[in-house]
Image: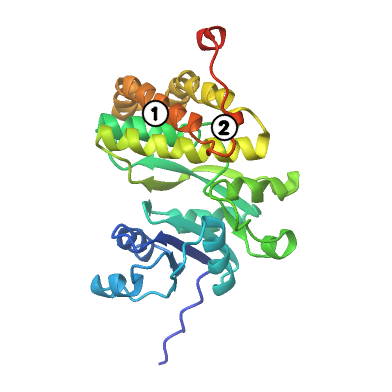
Amino acid sequence: MSSQPESAPELATIVIGYRAPAEIVGAVRSLSGQSVATEILVVNSGGGDVGALLRRNGLDVPFVEFEERLYVGAARNRGIERTRAPYVAFLADDCRAAPGWVERRLARHKAGAPVVASAVINSKPQNLVACAAHLSLFMRRLPGLPEEQAIRYGASFERGLFRGHGLYDETMATGEDSEFLQRLPAELKPAWDGDIRTVHLNETRILRLLVDQYQRGTNYGREMHRLSGKPLRKIARDVLRQHRPARQLAMAGLSGDELIQTLRAMPILRLSLFAKAAGVLMAADNRDRSVVAPLSRHETRR
């Protein structure tokens, strides 16, 4: 009696790496261990020989490498072009797909949602630095948030949307996902599902957290100024104000011991926001210092 051929996966997941980081192995394993199969493609840029890394770790999955660095939008596009499943998702090398990640996405898509957004959970919920890092990055993607408070990222898509609305902007260092979602009409707004959970590998050492936040602030300030025209001092001030909504969102989106630890981490969060704001203020290059205006005493008191 002949066995039934396996059906082709219905969800393609594009795993994005830069310089073949060791962490990408865990990202791929989190997908290969899902209860429902997904078409996996690793897209690595900047060198590093991701193929050898995968083989050394016993992973036989398709990959494509680019010697030049690709921004995330370009890496997403190369993956979309090289996969075939009717739905498309993405996973960064420093993330893991929690159990049920594929199955739940497909269920929401098949129930009629063309775009499905997901929550992000903390890799080290008992570590105070990791709690602060997680809240600074994902305060509006906590799993318990009601849909009206959640920001709709970490999305998977019906493949046809890319034919109808184009691919990602390949020139943006950050924010390519926001730019793409803004192109979609209102009826294609992502559906929020807090039960689809991506684990983010958060920093556990405070100095590295502050350096990371400073670097993120520089990129964030540059992109926000380019897109909105806001002066960097105002962008930095908005960053510093995030500690108030962060606490409120933690109360709404977390529970139990994780909430207790996150509230204990609020002083570290404030330090990280100062580092990010400092990065914002340094975002202007030497040719255009005009976008950084000194904070007046009145402005700093607000």
Residue situated in front as seen by the camera: 292 or 34:
292
How many marks the image carries: the answer is: 2
Q: Residue furthest bottom?
A: 1
Discs 2/1, front: 2
Say which amino acid is labelled 2: Arg
As drawn, is 218 to the left or to the right of 259?
right
Tell me where residue 301 appears, x and y as whole percent.
Answer: 51, 7
Residue situated in front as seen by the camera: 7 or 203:
203
At label 1, counting other C-alpha atoms closer than 10 Å, the crowd grade (few under 14, some 14-19, many 20 or more) is many
Give the alpha-carbon distance from disc 2 to disc 1, as whole Å. 20 Å
Tell me where residue 280 appears, x and y as whole percent.
Answer: 49, 31
Q: Residue furthest front?
A: 287
As drawn, is 72 to the left or to the right of 95?
right
x 42%, y 26%: residue: 273
At label 2, counting other C-alpha atoms closer than 10 Å, the crowd grade (few under 14, some 14-19, many 20 or more) is few
Helix, strand or loop at label 2? It is helix
Residue 142 in sight here: no
Quadrant, the C terminus = top right
x 27%, y 29%: residue: 128
Tell me where residue 171 appears, x and y as whole percent.
Answer: 60, 55
Tell me where residue 24 appears, x and y as whole percent.
Answer: 34, 60
- The picture quadrant where one finds residue 27 is bottom left
Say which amino acid is labelled 1: Ala
Label located before the other in sequence (2 or 1): 1
x 29%, y 70%: residue: 53
- The picture quadrant where one finds residue 134 is top left
Disc number for residue 289: 2
Disc number for residue 275: 1
